[in-house]
């Protein structure tokens, strides 16, 4: 029996009905205007998928772009996403007891931006340029909408994204075949996106919501970036730099001496100023002095990111570090200096074997979120302790893991003040204890050095949470999950041609989030 026979409804619609339903969901369907009009952005509103390279001149002597990019115009995509939330907005107004006929202005929308490179997107056989086997995806999530009613001091939140890290709320804006390390091509394609975003900051959007025209202003927070991408966007040296942090000026040695007391000082504006100093060298200093003056800024910052830490990559980075500590403890490195390669390999396979036996945890080539989640547990630490001969080392390792597990919910949960208030209160104390353990018992690993994410975890979490209320909600996780969808849509739902496949993927992905 078919679905229709049991329900009396026809589930599979004829194609033209689907096409029309799709049109309403895809960007370019709803009318809107900006006041004042956006600078350097066309005022037409019925714009669908555009070529990410549009506006590039390709005259005869230009190097042809070895890249393909497809995107939505940023403002058009935001309108489509807002219209998708129309019912939630109206319901939010009703729940707050606000009369929707008077609430026509004063809406504020906060948008989370994410951008991530994907390795190994193998080449399709098709005509078109030879593109790199890498892709970069730029997405946004509408995090909250609030309104400041006339005469009121405080804004009232009428919509809050309940699952800010779900791939369902993370909308694709731009897809490109580019290697994320190819700074020139990446900045050239994201340039127009940045320009549109900048224009929107100085203007109000007027759209009809619930039958009345209402005006919205936007705030953008680029938080869904891993450290590599932040350094690339903000003009900082690569992750191995002595300047260990994207939030403060600390060097690696300083960060390992004083693990806990640092405050967030870097900002997009400061990076731009420092780049100017780097470029002009106004005090005629030597290369080393100059580099020390600008604290590792050595390229022009290109896109504003929020100085925060990405919860997902924090998890992954710290798990990588614990995985190494486990190996060192199995091999009792604290007793002896530089062990041979063979010994290290033995410890590693002993660790892998134990994890597989006790936790059914298969070794992975590159640390990922799922492995990290399962490695950073009390069970894993206990399993490792079975391989450690000395009782006091076992105690120290378990204590280290327990402290970590006390700290982790604070930067992982969506709203720590609500989800784990006790751990939030104890965070500074716990991080101090953790740092003390590292600098005494585990001194052999942290003498004058520390990993980037451990430094951020220990030094910056409380300040960021005080400022933003959350770290977990602003993570890159939704965008990372979107990478899986990209692969799936590319296999299943796209035309077999380089020139068309990206727009098919972009369209399907957008519909998936609608």
Image: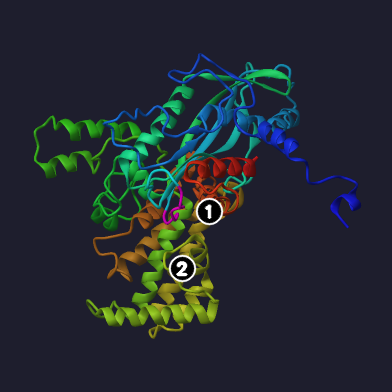
Q: For mark 1, give the secondary structure.
A: helix
- Residue 44 visible in the shown view: yes
Q: Is residue 257 above or below residue 56?
A: below
Residues shaded magenta: 119-126
Secondary structure at numbered mark 2:
helix
The residue pinned by badge 1 equals 487
Q: How many marks?
A: 2
> Where is residue 137 drawn, in percent x and y?
47, 44
Height in image: 12 above or below 361?
Answer: above
Q: First in sequence, mark 1 or 2: give its number.
A: 2
Q: Nearer the viewer, residue 116 or 428?
A: 116
Q: Nearer the viewer, mark 1 or mark 2?
A: 1
Residue nearest the observer in this picture, 89 or 35: 35
Q: Quadrant of the C terminus?
A: top right
Residue visible at 9% across and 37% down in the picture? 285
Q: Is residue 171 visible?
A: no
Q: Which mark is residue 401?
A: 2
Q: Residues within 10 Å of mark 2 (few under 14, many from 20)?
A: many
């Amino acid at each position: 029996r078919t679905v229709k026979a049991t329900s009396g409804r026809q589930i599979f619609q004829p194609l033209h009905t689907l096409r029309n339903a799709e049109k309403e969901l895809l960007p370019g369907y709803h009318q809107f205007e900006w006041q004042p009009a956006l600078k350097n952005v066309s005022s037409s509103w019925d714009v669908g998928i555009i070529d990410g390279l549009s506006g590039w001149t390709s005259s005869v002597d230009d190097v042809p772009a070895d890249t393909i990019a497809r995107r939505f115009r940023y403002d058009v995509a935001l309108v489509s996403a807002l219209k998708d939330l129309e019912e939630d907005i109206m319901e939010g107004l009703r729940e707050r007891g606000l009369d929707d006929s008077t609430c026509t202005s004063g809406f504020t929308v906060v948008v989370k931006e994410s951008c991530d490179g994907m390795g190994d997107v193998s080449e399709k056989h098709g005509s078109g340029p030879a593109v790199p086997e890498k892709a970069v995806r730029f997405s946004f999530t509408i995090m909250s909408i609030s309104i400041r009613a006339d005469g009121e001091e405080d804004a009232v939140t009428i919509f809050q994204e309940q699952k800010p890290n779900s791939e369902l709320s993370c909308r694709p804006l731009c897809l490109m075949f580019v290697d994320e390390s190819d700074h020139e091509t990446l900045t050239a394609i994201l340039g127009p996106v940045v320009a549109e975003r900048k224009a929107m900051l100085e203007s109000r959007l007027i759209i009809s919501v619930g039958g009345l025209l209402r005006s919205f202003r936007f705030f953008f927070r680029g938080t869904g970036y891993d450290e590599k991408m932040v350094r690339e966007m903000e003009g900082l040296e690569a992750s191995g730099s002595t300047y260990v942090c994207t939030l403060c000026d600390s060097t690696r040695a300083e960060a390992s001496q004083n693990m806990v007391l640092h405050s967030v000082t870097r900002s997009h504006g400061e990076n731009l100023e420092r780049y100017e100093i780097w470029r002009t060298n106004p005090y005629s200093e030597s290369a080393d002095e100059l580099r020390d003056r600008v604290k590792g800024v050595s390229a022009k910052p290109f896109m504003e990111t929020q100085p925060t830490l990405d919860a997902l990559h924090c998890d992954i980075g710290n798990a990588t570090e614990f995985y190494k500590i486990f190996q060192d403890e199995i091999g009792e490195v604290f007793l002896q200096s530089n062990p041979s390669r063979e010994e290290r390999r033995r410890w590693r396979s002993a660790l892998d074997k134990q994890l597989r036996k006790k936790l059914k945890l298969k070794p992975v080539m590159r640390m990922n979120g799922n492995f990290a989640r399962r490695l950073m547990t009390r069970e894993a630490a206990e399993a490792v302790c079975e391989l450690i001969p000395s009782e006091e080392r076992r105690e120290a390792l378990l204590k280290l893991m327990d402290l970590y597990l006390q700290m982790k919910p604070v930067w992982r949960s969506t709203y720590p003040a609500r989800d784990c208030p006790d751990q939030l209160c104890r965070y500074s104390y716990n991080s101090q204890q953790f740092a003390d353990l590292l600098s005494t018992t585990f001194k052999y690993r942290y003498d004058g050095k520390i990993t980037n994410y451990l430094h951020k975890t220990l030094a910056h979490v409380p300040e960021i949470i005080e400022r933003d209320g959350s770290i977990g909600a602003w993570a890159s996780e939704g965008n990372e999950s979107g990478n899986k969808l990209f692969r799936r849509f590319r296999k299943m739902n796209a035309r077999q041609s380089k020139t068309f496949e990206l727009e098919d993927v972009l369209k399907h992905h957008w519909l998936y989030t609608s």
